[in-house]
Image (spheres, grey):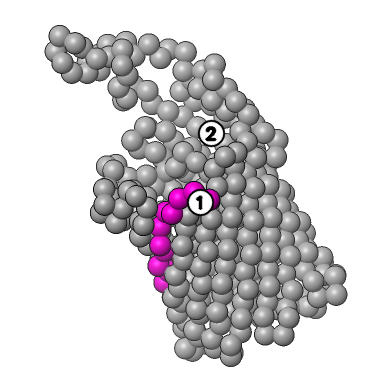
Amino acid sequence: MKLLYTLLFLSLFYSSSIAQDIHLSQYYTSNLSLNPAYTGNFDGDVKVGLNSRTQWAQISPAMKTNMISIEKKILTKQNEFGVGMILINDQVSSFFLNTNKIMLSGSYQKNYNGHLIRFGIQSGIVMRNINTNDQTFPSQWNYQLGSYDPTSNNNEGSVKNTWHYIDINAGLGWSHLYGKVKLSAGYALFNVNRPIEGYGSANKAIPFRHVFNTSAVYYMNPKLSLVPHILYMNSATATDFLAGVNAYRKFTERLGLMAGAGYRGSTANSDAAIAYGGISYDRFVFGLSWDFNVSSLSKNSRYKTAWEVSLTYTTPSRKSNKVTLPCDRY
């Protein structure tokens, strides 16, 4: 418990970034930010996870995204439940925009003849603030000096510097074992309640964000498995598509390695090629990924986009369920 308390305490000092919704290359390591239905969907009793992403370091200061989550599986004779909490702190330093989220999740799983169906819901508070005092505006341009005068009035008095709202998300999940292949798929709808957000009088309802993911775990032998995976997200006119494949190899009962590759893009543009790597030791799993820019901005970004790390710790199960599926950890 000391480890869990320490991680929760450290999360209060996390800083991160992004003006959009949470965006991870290692999305499969963060159940609560991917789909509320996946709350408690892991092999163990309690799981604690850390995710950190540094994006566009070429634009100083870089955008950063950090989060911490904790979730617990609750088993009964017939059913499975999951509860969890995720804390997110984002920071877009270039615009002095900070976003903090505290979300609580719950899930329920039902077994229908080996088909595992999951339902989940998530709700919490989103808090945002922006520091306009450290930004420059057209009204602050001094034509006589030929430069910006930060002491001049920015004429942005009607802009709200802080705002908050309640957000609700929901999701579904499915998985089934076909011989040596375990298939999984999920759909999540974020911003179900369409909360209002904006600066001053430009308030608008946040659009729905649709998230679809699917994967197939192919158990080649007891120590080696391949996992192709796909993620698709859509919000208003914006789309995000990610596809990849990871290979997991167990060397001993305590040690395992993972390596993989992926691609991210949209319906109109290419974004990045992704390299994945990871190591597991006992109940700890560490993951590392690098987004290699392949878009038209690649030369300006010096072919670099983002670094991302993940760390999870899972406690052993204290109670076994009647129906289990093999789940290798890398």
Q: How far from the left and from the top, in percent, is residue 312?
A: 51, 65
Disc 2: CA contacts within 10 A as few (<14), some (14-19) or many (>=20): some
Q: State the extent of the magenta-drawn residues as a range.
A: 267-282
- Label 1 or label 2, whichever lies nearer to me, is 1
SS of the residue under disc 2:
strand
Residue drawn where x is 59% and y is 42% of the image: 235
Residue drawn where x is 53% and y is 55% of the image: 241
Residue drawn where x is 56% and y is 75% of the image: 227
Q: Would you name the residue on which mark 2 appears?
A: 127
Q: Is residue 218 visible?
A: yes
Magenta stretch encompasses residue 277: yes
**Left-right relation of 1 to 173:** left
Disc 1: CA contacts within 10 A as few (<14), some (14-19) or many (>=20): some
Q: How far from the left and from the top, in percent, is residue 302?
A: 25, 54
Q: Would you name the residue on which mark 1 appears?
A: 266
Q: Nearer the viewer, residue 145 or 267?
A: 267
Q: Compared with residue 299, is residue 92 higher up or lower down, i.e. above or below? A: above
